[in-house]
Image: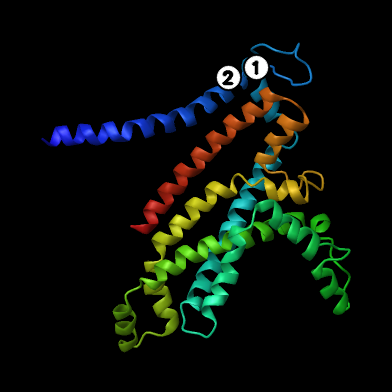
Amino acid sequence: MKKKIKFQLLSLIAPAVICLLIWMIVPLLLALNFSFQDFYLQDSSKTGYVGFKNYYYLFKEVNFISSLFTTIIFVLSIISVTVVLGITLSILFNQDVYGKGIARILVISPFFIAPTVAAGLWKLMLMSPTFGLFKWISKSLGYKPIDWFGDLPLFSIITIVSWQWLPFALLIILTALQSLPKDQVEAAKIDGANDFQIFQHITINHLKRPIAIVIMLETIFVLNIFAHIYATTNGGPGNATTNFTYLIYQKALLDYDVGGAAAGGIIAVIIANIFAFFLLKFLAKNIN
């Protein structure tokens, strides 16, 4: 009877699993196939298998190492900002204060804005050295306006993406914080623990799992930042904000080198899986 039920469950799940595998594997196999070919959109005569030539030239690419380094900076910086601010704001919003509901809506709203719209909003209305809000504030205080995307491009992109992903971290951490057993906190207070000791030994331990979820999910998305860079700096100035995703875009749609872009895509998949492997091991070790 149990075997029959198990078979029925598998037969129900199988179509969805097969569709998902096809949806994932077919594009990956096509990218792997193109990565071993000379394939230029502007020159159809340059075709045929070339072995690992595309990988070799990609590793020799001037921006290859710098794009990987920029990607790591984005991931570490954005996750650090969103987790720290997410914990701080979740503690504030967990208090009974007037206007808490409206404040939550305002804080969460950036998450529902399209990346290109968010990037345009910050670029034109806030960070513009000509007519942005920050320019007006600087002038009012007697300081010279900052050309954010010219002088501080990495910081500007990190600020925009962190602003968009902070609500995600806040929602998960706040939901977990609201499930914190109050009897533990009250018992700690009776035993003489102060607010910092309660936060250090009770609150943080309770939030380890949701923080791990935030780090894992945000890492997946932040590794693939593209729209914010495309809408603001186009990878510049120079290659200051060119991450690995944007480098692949340049190879495919600016250099018309499909083979090189496919090789970059395969390398990106490998790097992402290596990163995920060590991240999961680290998180599993620290949340047990």
Answer left or right for 13 relative to 168. Answer: left
Which residue position is annotated with label 2? 33
Q: Is residue 149 above or below residue 245?
A: below
Q: Residue at x 45, y 42 (%)?
A: 277
Task: Tell which of 20 and 271 is nearer to you.
Answer: 20
Label 1: how many residues lie within 10 Å, few (<14), some (14-19) or many (20+)? Answer: many
Label 2 secondary element: helix
Task: Tell which of 253 and 53 is nearer to you.
Answer: 253
**Could you say which disc has been placed on residue 217 in the image?**
none
Residue 232: % across, % down: 77, 51
Is the residue under label 1 in contact with that under label 2 (CB below 8 Å)?
yes
Mark 2 to mark 1: distance in Å?
Answer: 7 Å
Q: Residue at x 35, y 73 (%)?
A: 180
Label 2: how many residues lie within 10 Å, few (<14), some (14-19) or many (20+)? Answer: some
Residue 142: % across, % down: 89, 78
Residue 147: % across, % down: 84, 61
Q: Is residue 159 above or below residue 25?
A: below
Amino acid type at mark 1: Gln
Amino acid type at mark 2: Asn
Q: Quadrant of the C terminus?
A: bottom left
Which residue position is annotated with label 1? 37
Q: Is residue 61 visible?
A: no
Answer left or right for 99 relative to 141. Answer: left
Q: Is residue 47 above or below residue 276?
A: above
Q: Residue at x 83, y 55 (%)?
A: 150
Q: Quadrant of the N terminus?
A: top left
Label 1 secondary element: loop
Residue 130: % across, % down: 89, 63
